[in-house]
Amino acid sequence: MENIFFQINKADIYINDYKEDDKLCGYELNTYTRRGVNQILFLDFRDTQLDPENPEDFFKVLSHRIDDIDIDEEIEIHRQMSDYRKIFSIRESLEDFKEWKKNLQRLAKEVQNLNLKL
């Protein structure tokens, strides 16, 4: 897991443990789009049989979470904020969020490659 976290941190994504009653239940990945929009991805292991400390299980949850990102939904949420609308056009938002998701998908492949080498 140390190598995976190192790879993720290298991509300027910060990881925090998510615990309930001192039990590790997942991770929060604090990410930013290229244009500076803060996005938190929650990797939730609750209600699964997956182990948050197992590299293969981590990859499964990470990959699934990234695949579930709905760019239209993310843009819609952010465009509800007037400050965001002043800074970003719809086109700029679309480009920014597409690039963000693509970078996350690339990172997931790097994490998968680390798992294959272990």
Image: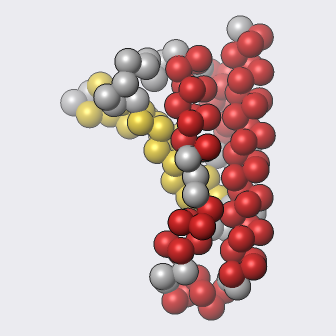
User: x and y percent of residue 44 in the render?
Assistant: 41, 36
* Residue at the limit of the structure toward the left, as seen here: 21
At x 54%, y 41%, the residue is: 65
Position of 93 compared to 17: left or right? right
Tell me the quarter of the picture where residue 1 sits: top right
| Quadrant hosting residue 66 | top right
Decide: is 56 above or below 35. Answer: above
Can residue 10 be seen by looking at this rendering?
Answer: no
Q: In this view of the protein, which residue sits in the foreground, 90 or 6? A: 90
Describe the colour scheme in one phrase. secondary structure
Q: Residue at x 26, y 34 (%)?
A: 20
Residue 11 image offset from top left, x and y in percent: 73, 43
Is residue 115 toward the left or the right of residue 53 in the image? right
Q: Position of residue 15 (x, y in %)?
A: 54, 40
Q: Quadrant of residue 26?
A: top left
Q: Nearer the viewer, residue 22 or 90?
A: 90
Q: Quadrant of the C terminus?
A: top right
Residue at horizontal 73%, vertical 38%? Answer: 107
Q: Is residue 7 left or right of residue 61?
A: right
Q: Nearer the viewer, residue 59 or 35?
A: 59
Q: Is residue 102 visible?
A: yes
Residue 39, given in percent of the width and then of the height, sits at 56, 58
Compared across the picture, whether 101 is left or right of 46 comes to right
- How many marks do you count on the picture? 0
